[in-house]
Image (cartoon, coloured by chain):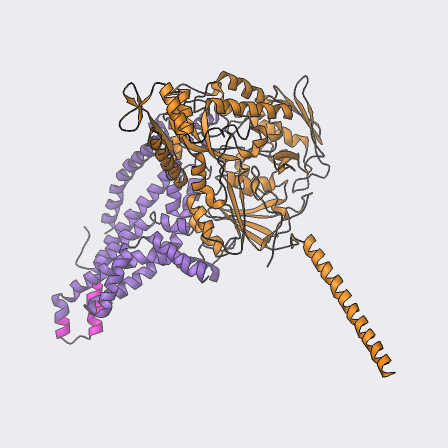
Amino acid sequence: MRRKRRGVQLLGALFGVLLIATACSSDNNKNNAAAGSSSAPEVPKGGTLIIGAEQEPDCMDWIGTCSGSSWGYWMAAVQTMPRAFDVVKDSSGNYVYKPSILLKGEPKLETSPKQKVTYEIADDAVWSDGEPITSTDFKYTWDQIANGTDVYDKTGYQDIESVDDSNPKVAVVTFKTNYQDWKGLFTGNYGIFPAHILQGQDRDAAMKDGYKFSGGPWIIDSWTKTDNITLVPNPKYWGPKPNLDKVIFKFQPDTSAEFTAFKSDQVSMIYPQPQLDAVDQINAGLPNTQKVISVDTGNFEALWMNMGKPPFDDEAVRKAVAFAIDRGAIVERLFGGLGVHEPLQFLNARVVKQYADENAFAQYKKDLSQVDKLLTGAGYTKGSDGFYAKNGQKLSILVRTTAGNKRRELTEQILQQQLKDAGIDMQIENAKAGDLFGELAPLGDFNAAIYAQVLTTLGPSTCNLFCSNNASPIGQKGGNNYTRTNIPELDTVLHQMDGELDDAKLMDEGKQAERIKADHVISLPIDPLPNILLWSNKVVGPIDDNGILGPFWNMNLWGVTS
Amino acid sequence: MLTYSLRRVLYSIPVLLIASFVLFAGVRATFDPTARLAQSRDPQVQIRERERLGLNDPLVVQYGNWLKNAVHGDFGQSATSREDVSKMISRAMGNTLQLIIIGAVVSVFIAIGIGVFSAVRQYSILDYLFTGLSYIGVAMPPFWFGLLAIEFFVVQHRWFLSVGLHTGDSSGFDLDYLKHLVLPVATLCVQIIASWSRYQRASMLDALSADYVRTARAKGVPRWKVVFKHALRNALIPFVTVVALDFGALFGGLIITETIFSIGGMGRLFYNAILVGDVYVVQAWMILVAVIIILFNLCADLIYGILDPRIRLA
């Protein structure tokens, strides 16, 4: 009997253990499941986020010539001005335009007899004062840009013939000629302006020191000049309302001060330029920090070669320089610490890489035998000093870049050594940015220059940079074709791209254009200037860089933990 | 004294006019305010901007237009931000004044204290210590000290703050403000205390070796009275001159401190304006700083006369 009772007790205990084990096991699974599904922490509501800003905008009249500041655009314009399209990454990792919540869907594009785009505005799209966003706002925006005198960039808007606002919720935009980057209009640097507030007013006076209207998730609460811009949620926003109570952009023009503020938790996020001291700071280690280093940016740096005068008027010399330089070594030295190792292999920004042959310039690797073959074939001979010469004249190139930019100055020094090894003399004469872009480059007073181009829309055409009609003779200003590129087949393709409305054809034309650029080595791409975004662990949400809209474009979805 | 003051002010006006024209011409010849637009896709934007800013007019016409408005107190608008120059200057001045006034007051008291002590206790251990520290202070670049101070006091110990004058978008005179003020003021004070204390020590030594001091001591006047009532008063005369001159120069010379601590003061305003050729801002800045220096020089002369009744300004 005692044995039987003990057996029952044992069974009971075993059963109890089994019960407990089952309970614990199911809890663990739930936790594991929960952990698996909540790999992104829940975004809390409330709180203030302070972000370090390297640059203060000159003004907030986004149309005027006082605008043009990238930081101003990222901090304020993107947050408050409604736009027709967002710029997002598709499943292939390419940046594409996607209709924003301002629109009901993809606008209707008609190509015949003229290019005509019909935008249907969302019924619930309203300004912060409750007034609906209408087609009249589209018309007002176009008129201000196309017909104004104080305008930063009229490109594209001048190609619009009319904007029909007879239906308040439908804007019909008719073009004079085909304009490829139509999605960049009413999107890019400007967005859409409120006609009911600004009509009849001096728009510049009303906006330049900040404004209280908004068609985005945020409103500008204050702009304390030289100190900060503060944003608060727009209560009338018809999209996802911000989780944060407030976002403050604190101006810090000095890189080391910026990192100090970040390390001491005075700011929780910074977006530093990829200068050498920034790279050193990151490599030294930043505790409790997350980062994104992106090469798919709107920026790219190149060695721009002046084809308008010797020696780069000779294609053989340009190709020789391309084979003399180890671009991979340069990129490794500049950005290797950030995990960026590959040079750029096409002459455009990586935000439009789907419109380029990404390996167009890959053939140009360091090959001194090719250098010799090309230069010898062009009539150069190597002298006893180790440099090539022709007709008693040493092959020497004058390179300029922006004085004080340590990264570019280092690039010059590496280039100088590499070219010297290849038998090409390189002289350096740098200038202030104002002089370089205001005088020297426009006048063609350089052989080669190192600087960056920045794309602000997803329009891939580089006709403004390389079409011969945008070049002026050496010694005269006019047009942005500072390299004096004049290649008829390239002109044809680039002009075609400017008016190409078929995206598949545009991709083919873009690839063709890059191959022509590479075949003639009109200039030499060096690096895809990466974007660096650093943020404290207490900032949560879908944080990522955006090569066109900037990293703060979806700030309404972020939050801060305590 | 009034006649003297008026004469000094009147002599300054032609100097200011000539200086303003030279500066205007120099900035226009050197910097192009439309250069930042060169990389815009729109090739016409620079042409439009030149027209808007009147840059196609002859230099003399441009200067004349500016002068005509300036004499009425209108210094125009910034070429880049379109903001009234007067507003920009007064904001920058406000930020710089906070640093200078507090820094100068602290520095004066500390420098006088060190100078008097070092002179009275000449060749003592503390005198040698203060002398050594002064040389280090004079030799040390302010940016180096500032960055070290930030690393130690802000990053490692979080005792003070280093971004602007307030946290976030707050304002007002509170503990947060003081925590922001300590390090930039300390950075400013280090160099000027070092040099002012040397001046004070030297002039105090001169005063203490004078006959009247020896007479006072011989007549049994208490030591503290000899030092503070007789010697110090005379020793302050050259010290006041140095302080007045340096004080005026500080208004435009804090660019490094302002950059490190992200304070939008007069130094940064001038530097940023010069870089983009914002000539109206540069002109107004120059005139204001010149007037301040003239006024402080005048104050130094007047105080000189007050401190030393033997001096009468004709």
Q: Which residues are magenta?
A: B215-234
Q: How far across and down, in percent of the image, does residue A535 sit?
A: 54, 51
Left-right relation of A509 to B131: right
Number of marks: 0
Q: Nearer the viewer, residue B27 or A459?
A: A459
The residue at the far right in this view is A1
Q: Residue at x 79, y 68 (%)?
A: A18
Residue A358: give x, y in percent of width and height.
54, 31
**Is residue A432 something that shows in the picture?**
yes
Which residue occupies the foreground of this view, B302 or A181? A181
Q: Is residue A502 left or right of residue B80?
A: right
Estimate the x, y position of residue B258 in percent, counting from the top left: 39, 50
Residue B226 falls inside the magenta stretch: yes
In the rendered view, does A119 fall on the left or right side of B202? right
Drawing shade for chain A: orange
Q: Position of residue B176 (x, y in %)?
A: 48, 60
One can see residue A254 in this view? no
Could you say which quadrant of the image residue A500 lies in? Answer: top right
Q: Is residue B271 magenta?
A: no
Q: Quadrant of residue B99?
A: bottom left
Residue B231 lies left or right of residue A34; in this view the side is: left
Residue in the image at 73% along x and 37% along y: A123
Q: Please identify the dominant SS of the magenta region.
A: helix
Can you say whether A176 is above or below A80 in the image? above
| Chain B representation colour | purple
